[in-house]
Image (cartoon, helix red, strand yellow):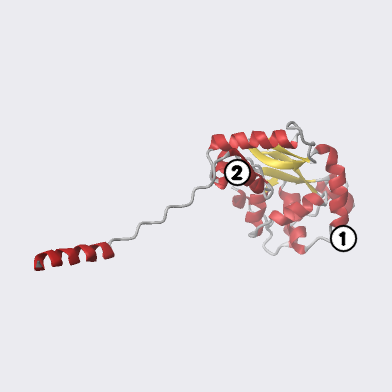
Amino acid sequence: MTDDTAETRDAADGANTAPAQAPIPAQRPSDPASVARRLEAILLVLDEPQSLVSLAAAVGAPVPAVRQAVEALVADYDGETGGPVRGFELREVGGGWRLYVREEYDDVVGEFVNTQAPSRLSQAALETLAVIAYKQPVTRGQVASIRAVNVDSVVRTLLARGLITEVFTDSDTGAIHYGTTDQLLVNLGINSLDELPHISPLLDDGSDGFDGEVLK
């Protein structure tokens, strides 16, 4: 009886010291409606087009399910499902997907944003605008590397003010390259970017201030 009691106690002690199992992560719903809602939430905060693979990772769903959800959202926004045509559209650009204002509403949105924007640009916006003016066409990532800060919101401000524009999208990376607009020339009172002052004389070390190695 003593041996049986000892064996029972040992077994109980072993159960108490057994490592706890890791919790099983909650599975995200995979039904089409749920995937579409999560995808729509992600699309609302995107600044650059994202591939189906990136979107699938963001919403925790298989690529085929995300592709189906994208097609459903495109049809919904375009009024193909019986509802009204939305003022925005889900468009594929450079191998990625992003929400855009429909072309026919560009003027309305531009006028609204301009009336809401402050009359003067911040120092951060001026510095970002200078980098784009001298290094264009340039991506947001390249501008961020030069300024060593995040420039997402500043770039959106400059786009809204009509001072920069999307020049082209890299077909391999989906990165948008930005350049300045004629509106900037008007605001500066010059006819071309060639009239911008050279940066070198303004710096003590005589460099142009934008090391090309940073952009590689």
Element carrying mark 2: helix
Q: What amino acid type is highlighted by mark number 1?
A: Ser
x then y, percent, for residue 3: 10, 65
Say what amino acid the circle numbered 2 marks.
Ser
67 left or right of 125? Answer: left
**Viewer-side residue, 20 vs 144:** 20
Say what secondary structure mark 1 lies in: loop
Instruction: Check disc 2: other Cα within 10 Å, few if <14, some if 14-19, many if 20+.
Output: some
Count neighbours of disc 1 (C-alpha within 10 A) and say few if under 14, some if 14 to 19, many if 20 or more.
few
Residue 93 seen from this side: no
**Residue 46, numbered circle:** none
Left or right, residue 76 beside residue 103: left
- Residue at 67% across, 62% down: 205
Is residue 31 visible in the rendered structure shown here?
yes
Q: Residue at x 68, y 39 (%)?
A: 169
Nearer to the camera, 170 or 137:
170
User: Percent x, y for residue 130?
Assistant: 75, 55
Name the image quarter holding residue 39: top right
Q: Please state which of residues 157 and 195 is positioned toward the viewer in this rendering.
A: 157
User: Which residue is the extreme one toward the front?
Assistant: 1
Mark 1–mark 2 Cα distance, whole angstroms, equals 42 Å
Task: State the residue position of label 2.
Answer: 34
The residue depicted at 70 percent of the width and 64 percent of the height is 204
Label located before the other in sequence (1 or 2): 2
Residue found 78% across the figure and 62% down from its top: 122
Q: Pick the quarter of the image with the N terminus.
A: bottom left
The spot of residue 115 in percent (x, y) is 88, 55
* Residue 118 location (% of width, % of height): 84, 60
Residue bearing mark 1:
119
